[in-house]
Image (spheres, rainbow, N blue to C red):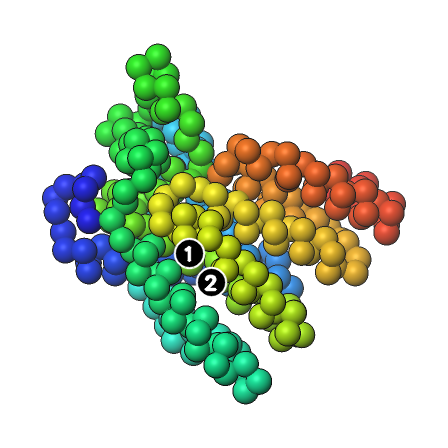
């Protein structure tokens, strides 16, 4: 730990800060979501909306040259919200009860310990070559200078996305495992969303095992490369496309936010997001021709 930041603080304090920041993002999303998307008040959607909003504001602050000042404000606000929301971790017991269903108790225990190992991996020190280059290098540079690096000098410095902007919050508070755990935390919350939406436990466990058994998951949660989180955003949008019986203004706006967020965290998601967006738009238009007019108004 502490390869990148100074002064050096104890790794356990870093982990505590990481948990508090993720809890703060979740609380911020809940505050937003209960007022805008009341029928979609799920942990994952709260977390996703807050993360996308924070990244947008940080990007705007970068344009005006006040990036570090904005990071400081968000760091303090999220830290306070995270402490207020610390009771959230008590609610994990509810998720565990859902996981340890009587018919799948053994499987539930295996999955539980598997996630414990994933958490330990996500809280480890950064070691990826590109992570030590621009995934951490760009946010550190922005914190020191509040403007983008010269592409002629540092070519990889232009490859950053909104994930690197959020990562700056953790680096400012002297924790270098924040965004790595951020992505695993979003995966756990995604399963919470899925288990509440999918009543068929057999289908749920099939999807869960299908996802976590993929070898690439170890790569995705062991570094700050923003790949897992945008994948979850597009997956959620696609899931809502198949599950929603009728589209309305609220769910279309929510899906749009998820797809836009995915492309901004990683530009390579622009293709999949565009295809999903067009499918949803065409389907919504088929259900209700007035909805496009209502959105425009």
Instruction: Please give the name of the residue rendered at 60% of the width and 67% of the height, measured from the top-left corner.
Output: 206
**How far across and how far down the image is residue 189, in percent?**
49, 62
Position of residue 25 relative to residue 285, above or below, is below
Q: To which quarter of the image does residue 138 belong?
A: top left
Secondary structure at badge 1 equals helix
Instruction: Please give the name of the residue rendered at 41% of the width and 23% of the height, measured from the top-left corner.
Output: 158
**How far across and how far down the image is residue 51, in percent?**
46, 48
Left or right side of 169 for 281: right
Left or right side of 179 for 188: right
Q: Residues within 10 Å of mark 1 (few under 14, many from 20)?
A: many
Q: To which quarter of the image does residue 262 belong?
A: top right
Q: Residue furthest bottom?
A: 102
Position of residue 71 relative to residue 151, above or below, is below
For disc 1, the marked residue is 184
**How far across and how far down the image is residue 111, in percent?**
45, 71
Distance between the Cα atoms at labels 1 and 2?
6 Å
Instruction: Please give the name of the residue rendered at 84% of the width and 45% of the height, measured from the top-left corner.
Output: 285
- Can you see residue 96? no
Instruction: Please give the name of the residue rendered at 31% of the width and 64% of the height, measured from the top-left corner.
Output: 83
**How far across and how far down the image is residue 187, in percent?**
48, 58
For disc 2, the marked residue is 188
- Can you see residue 231? yes
The C terminus lies in quadrant: top right
> Are discs 1 and 2 less than 8 Å apart at CB?
yes
* Viewer-proximal residue among 104 and 149: 104
Q: Residue furthest top?
A: 152
Left or right side of 32 for 150: left
Secondary structure at badge 2 equals helix
């Amino acid at each position: 730990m502490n390869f990148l930041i100074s002064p050096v603080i104890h790794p356990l304090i870093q982990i505590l800060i990481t948990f508090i920041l993720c809890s703060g993002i979740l609380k911020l999303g809940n505050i937003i979501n209960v007022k805008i998307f009341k029928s979609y008040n799920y942990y994952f959607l709260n977390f996703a909306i807050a993360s996308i909003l924070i990244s947008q504001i940080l990007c705007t602050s970068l344009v005006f040259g006040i990036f570090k000042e904005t990071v400081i404000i968000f760091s303090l606000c999220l830290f306070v919200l995270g402490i207020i929301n610390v009771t959230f971790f008590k609610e994990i017991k509810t998720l565990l009860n859902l996981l340890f269903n009587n018919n799948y108790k053994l499987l539930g225990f295996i999955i539980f310990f598997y996630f414990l190992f994933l958490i330990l991996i996500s809280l480890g020190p950064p070691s990826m070559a590109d992570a030590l280059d621009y995934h951490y290098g760009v946010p550190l540079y922005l914190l020191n200078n509040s403007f983008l690096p010269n592409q002629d000098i540092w070519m990889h410095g232009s490859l950053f996305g909104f994930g690197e902007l959020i990562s700056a919050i953790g680096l400012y508070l002297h924790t270098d495992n924040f965004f790595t755990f951020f992505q695993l935390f979003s995966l756990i919350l995604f399963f919470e969303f899925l288990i509440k939406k999918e009543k068929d436990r057999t289908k749920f466990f099939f999807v869960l095992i299908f996802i976590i058994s993929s070898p690439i998951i170890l790569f995705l949660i062991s570094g700050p490369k923003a790949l897992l989180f945008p994948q979850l955003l597009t997956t959620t949008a696609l899931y809502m496309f198949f599950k929603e019986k009728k589209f309305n203004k609220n769910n279309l706006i929510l899906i749009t936010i998820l797809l836009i967020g995915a492309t901004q965290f990683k530009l390579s998601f622009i293709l999949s997001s565009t295809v999903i967006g067009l499918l949803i738009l065409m389907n919504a238009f088929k259900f209700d021709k007035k909805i496009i007019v209502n959105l425009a108004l």
